[in-house]
Structure formats: structure tokens, C-alpha cells
Amino acid sequence: MIRGFRNGVISFAFGATVCALRLRRVLSGLGKPRIRTVDHVTIPVHDLDAAQRFYCDLLGGALLARIDNDFFRRVGRPVYAENTQGVFHVSLLFGGATRIDLFQQNYGQAAAAQGHPHYAFRVRPRDLPKWKARLEVHGIPCDGPLQLGPPGQASLYFNDPFGNHLELECMGYAESIPARPPEMARIVWPSKAFAAQQ
């Protein structure tokens, strides 16, 4: 009970600090050019269909657009060879303002034992155990919840079918959890495992 209250206060204070920093940044930048927000992040994937199933069906992303030769024909652009790297992609939206673009590309994923880069998504504290159960039901190895930040911060680490490192993160987590970095060897899984379930 006390831990939950303390972690809630820390989460509120962290959020208030972020809001104050954003306000200060806006006010100090009046009349100056500035970057407003992150528009999109790109993630390399080997197979657009499997990526769309993983990120939409499992993680809950909303498909905004599929950029392929059919799309290029509709908008009057030249088409590309099907094996062209880094052109075809699907654009997704999650809960925030940042778009996620999954680009068909056979390289660019972090090494299996390397913690960075990874892509982190914010979830509600009460949903973190539900996410862990959801991933495990689909046979996706994960490590966590773990604490790397202040008390009440919690992260769950896992990979997508292509080896990209992902994190679900929250503030205000009330449960006692290990304070350590993820063990990257625990989240490695065969890339065909998710595709075989479909």
C-alpha cells in the first residue's frame, strides 16, 4: 500500500516535471524555429505481412497505410523491384502522436546481445502484467517487469519476429520487481515462431 502510494507520487512528480519542462521549452522558444515532436520512427522488418500481424494484431497498432507497388501505381509513382530494400513499408499508429513505419529491409536490427537501440512504448501500470501474459501466450519470450529508473518505473522487454528489441514501460508500478537491466539472451526467439502461429 505504502509502496503503491509512493510510486504513484513519483510517477505524478515525473509527469509534472516533464510538463513543466515542455512549457518552459515552448516559452523560451517563442519566435525561434524549433522541433515540435518526433513525427515517426522507422523499424526494419523482413516481412511486411508478418510485421503487420505482429504490430497490429498482437500489439494493437492501427494500420494507417501500406506503401507498396499497388500504392505507388495509385499515386502515379514508379514501381520498384519486390526485393528492393527500404522502400516498401507499413505505417502504424499507436496511442501517441508518433507514427511507426515498418520498412521491409533485411538488415539494421540490433545484435541479439545488444540492448540498444530498442523501441519503448508507454503502457498503464496495471496493464503491464496483462501484456506479459499476452506475449507469453503467443510464445514470445520476455524479461520483466524490471526497474531501471526511479521507484515505480517498470519495463518489460521482448523482441519482434525480426530481432528488433522492444520495451513496454510504465511509471507508478506498485509491485516489488528486480532492479536490473534486461538479460538479452532471455528474449531471443526464432523469427519463424510468430509466423507459424498465424
Image (cartoon, rainbow, N blue to C red):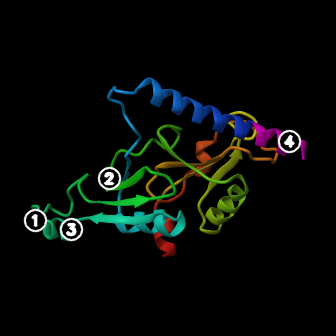
View extreme (bottom): residue: 198
Residue 107 in the image, given as x and y percentages of width and height: 33, 48
Stretch of the chain drawn in magenta:
1-9
Residue at image location 52% in from the left, 65% down from the top? 60
Residue 53 in the image, given as x and y percentages of width and height: 45, 69
Report which residue position mark 1 lands on.
Answer: 76
Q: Which of marks 3 and 2 is in front?
A: 3
Report which residue position mark 4 lands on.
Answer: 3
Task: Kindly indicate the quadrant of the structure image that contains residue 154.
Answer: top right
Left/right placement of residue 105 relative to residue 57 reads: left
- CA gap, disc 3 and disc 2: 21 Å
| Mark 4 Cα shell of 10 Å, populated few (<14), some (14-19), many (≥20) | some
Report which residue position mark 3 lands on.
Answer: 71
Foreground pick, 21 / 139: 21
Residue 156 in the image, given as x and y percentages of width and height: 64, 49
- CA gap, disc 1 and disc 2: 27 Å
SS type, badge 3: helix
Q: Nearer the viewer, mark 4 or mark 2?
A: 4
Label placed on residue 106: 2
> What amino acid is found at the position of numbered circle 3 in the picture?
Phe
> What amino acid is found at the position of numbered circle 2 in the picture?
Asn
